[in-house]
Amino acid sequence: MNDGKVDSSKLIADSQGDPNVAASSSQPSTLNRQLIHASPGQRAWRRFKKHHAAVWSARYLIFLLVLILAWPLILKISGGNFVRTHNPDELSDAQFAPPNVQHWFGTDMHGRDLFSRTLFGAQVSLLVGVVGAGVSLIIGVLWGSVAGYIGGRVDSALMRIVDILYSLPSIIFVIVLITTLGDIIKHSEVVKHSPGLANALQLVFLFVGLGAVSWLTMARIVRGQVLSLRTRAFVEASRTLGAGTPHIIFRHIIPNIFGVAITYVALTMPAIILYESFLSYLGLGVQAPMASWGTLISEGVAQINPIRIYWWMIFFPGAVLVTTLLALNFLGDGLRDAWDVKGK
């Protein structure tokens, strides 16, 4: 009978002496310990790395951004024929040249290098997207935070304004705003003597128009998050200690909705860039001699005729625009999944 009994002390000793058993038992506990002690940002980063489409989109956007910033420096450092060939404002006799060794994206109707014009146009398009998303972030977060935290009549009044603006067709509202402000500056004496100022003001009006309609969804999303945060224990504790409304909003509410706000900003940029391209295509956005992806596509479409289609003038700016919009959307999806509190 004694021979059939199992000595538990020997089993414990054997398991402690076996390195494979010890390693297998310690690895889950170490992993669990790391997950427990990880910050929300670290957990979000782990979930983001599992989203392969978002990771590759981030790499593409970083490469595009580096190329856009480095290309003007390359043109300044280089000299001679390379600068003359790739200068985006250099006119030449090589009109409508297809893609070749010298002109990688071909040339336009004035013989200008389309590769350089696409990169310089990306500066304007991305700038419009960043400024519009920044306006959406600032106004939307402040508006939604105040409405959600204060509540009551203030919440009702602020959200009714959002509902009224939501009822207006956004693109028509932007077109009316830009055309109205554009007509005002055209008849100004200051602008008549400074054409460069007129183009700068046109770009500012574009920023204002796109920013005026891009913050509405942000305000609604932030308000919903604040409604769930204002009853949390840390907010109640801060209120009990005598903290005022601005202190609670800026020190406790806004930092806790940062992930949601950044996610929506990444999803807002493609819509703003697409709006800008559409307005520039209609001639209401960026004006010559400045270039954006929308104006480049518009120039390519204007050259379509029954005899010949200069496909490269439409294909390359359109391809860069589409891939950038897809990358921004995939990046936004990855950030949304990463900051999801229910994410694994």
Image (spheres, rainbow, N blue to C red):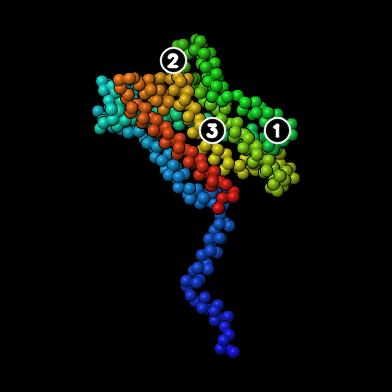
Crowding near pointer 2: few (<14 within 10 Å), some, many (20+)? few
Farthest-out residue, front: 306
Quadrant position of residue 99? top left
Crowding near pointer 1: few (<14 within 10 Å), some, many (20+)? some
Front disc: 1 or 3: 1
- Label 1 – label 2 distance at C-alpha: 44 Å
Residue 76, can we see it?
A: no
Tell me which label, 1 or 3, sits earlier in the chain: 3
> Which residue is at a point 46% across and 20% down the rendered structure image?
282
Foreground pick, 198 / 128 = 128
Q: Secondary structure at mark 3?
A: helix
> Which residue is at a point 44% across and 14% down the rendered structure image?
194
Quadrant position of residue 9? bottom right
Tell me which label, 1 or 2, sits earlier in the chain: 1
Q: In the rendered view, does 40 fall on the left or right side of 236?
A: left
Q: Which residue is mark 3?
A: 134
> Which residue is at a point 39% across and 33% down the rendered structure image?
319
Residue 65: percent from left, percent from top: 41, 36
Residue 278: percent from left, percent from top: 47, 25
Q: Which residue is mark 2?
A: 195
Foreground pick, 213 / 195 = 213
Q: Amino acid at mark 1?
A: Asp
Residue 340: percent from left, percent from top: 57, 47
Location of the N terminus by quadrant is bottom right
> Which residue is at a point 51% across and 65% down the rendered structure image?
27
Foreground pick, 250 / 335 = 335
Foreground pick, 87 / 109 = 109
Residue 59: percent from left, percent from top: 42, 43
Front disc: 2 or 3: 3
Q: Amino acid at mark 2?
A: Pro
Q: Which residue is mark 1?
A: 155
